[in-house]
Amino acid sequence: MGIPKRQERLRGRHAYVDGIRFVMPVDSRNSSAMMAAFPINWEKARALIPPGDVHPFRLWDRGLLVVTVIDYRDTDIGAYIEYSLAIACTKGAAPAPRLLPGILMRFFGTGQYVFDLPVSTEISVKGGKGIWGMPKHQANLDFVSGKSWVSSQYDLDGGMVSRFDVRLPKSYWLPLNMGAANYCVFRGMMMKSLIYFRGKVGFHLMRPGSARLVLGDHPRADVIRGLEVDPNPIFSGYIPQVLGVLDDYFECWFVTPETEPTAPIGEGLATTYPLGYGREWLTPPQRDPNFNLDRD
């Protein structure tokens, strides 16, 4: 599933949405991305996703936590880092069979339910949340690399939420041209958006220690900790140069629990309309001085 022809047809056209100007398509250039998938408790993952048509992907008897960090260096809204914490998922009336959604992705609506999405800048929050419904919020982030590792740390309110490290592959040979579906909750609705990537990826499969997710003491880390994350990823990878395109076409539908909600489901418009268009980053996270990116 490569970049849709519609995005090429719109190339060079202009959009002005929620006070943000875009030159179509909504893309990023000169970016880098790191990612990994860690097995988690499937039942705990199901409890984190609002009831309805989105269900955790099942890898045998486990779910998957997907961690992706992208260093966007050239976009219409400036440079920023995006640190995604998500649960691999499917879309349908009931949970999908084991494994098959990894092959028949379009049929099963395979994607990821994003439950936390810190970014570097205010304007990225305003656009990502206000337009596409993504759970973005501004946080202290970095994206650093050495001889052996590439790493990103996520701090908030003076505490560490998590640090994500990926061991650098020896080569980047596999061409990547694919799309991914993001499911997010905003305004009491499930929002489905599509993003497409093109580049060459280096990766590790079933290699213990090829990626690490280190949790801090911030309360947001407790959500991740509650998923009972296996420290050994089934996949990890790094794309040193990637083109990304975010589709301007997206879908949404009501979240419909069986009983009447006692509180709003997800954040609402009140969290986006006061935001401005700042492109300034918060201070970098406070890293452990003993962590060495050059050491195996």
Image (tube, grey):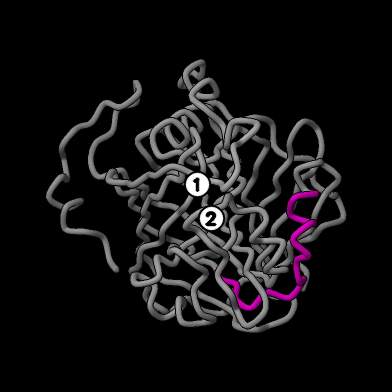
In depth, the one of 135 and 241 nearer the eye is 135
Residue at 70%, 45% in the rendered image = 154
Residue 3 against residue 37 in the figure, above or below: above
Is residue 141 something that shows in the picture?
A: yes
> In the figure, residue 14 lies in which quadrant?
top left
What secondary structure is marked by label 2?
Answer: strand
What secondary structure is marked by label 1?
Answer: strand
Q: Residues within 10 Å of mark 1 (few under 14, many from 20)?
A: many
Outermost residue on the left side: it is 9
Q: How crowded is mark 2: few (under 14 residues within 10 Å), some or many (20 or more)?
A: many
Residue under label 1: 184
On screen, residue 118 versus residue 18, left or right, reads right
Quadrant showing the N terminus: bottom left
* Three-letter code, disc 1: Cys
On screen, residue 113 versus residue 284, left or right, reads left
Residue at 60%, 72% in the rendered image = 236
On screen, residue 294 versus residue 121, left or right, reads right
In depth, the one of 150 and 64 nearer the eye is 64
Region of the chain picked out in magenta, as a range = 222-237
Query: Does the residue at mark 1 contact the one at mark 2 (Cβ under 8 Å)?
Result: yes
| Residue 9 x, y percent position in the rendering | 12, 50
Residue 194 against residue 236 in the figure, above or below: above
Query: How far apart, in angstroms, are the residues tagged by discs 1 and 2?
Result: 6 Å
Residue at 61%, 32% in the rendered image = 138
* Three-letter code, disc 2: Tyr
| Residue 67 x, y percent position in the rendering | 61, 59
Residue at 50%, 47% in the rendered image = 184
Residue 89 against residue 143 in the figure, above or below: below
Q: Does the stretch in magenta take in 229? A: yes
Residue under label 2: 113
| Residue 139 x, y percent position in the rendering | 65, 35
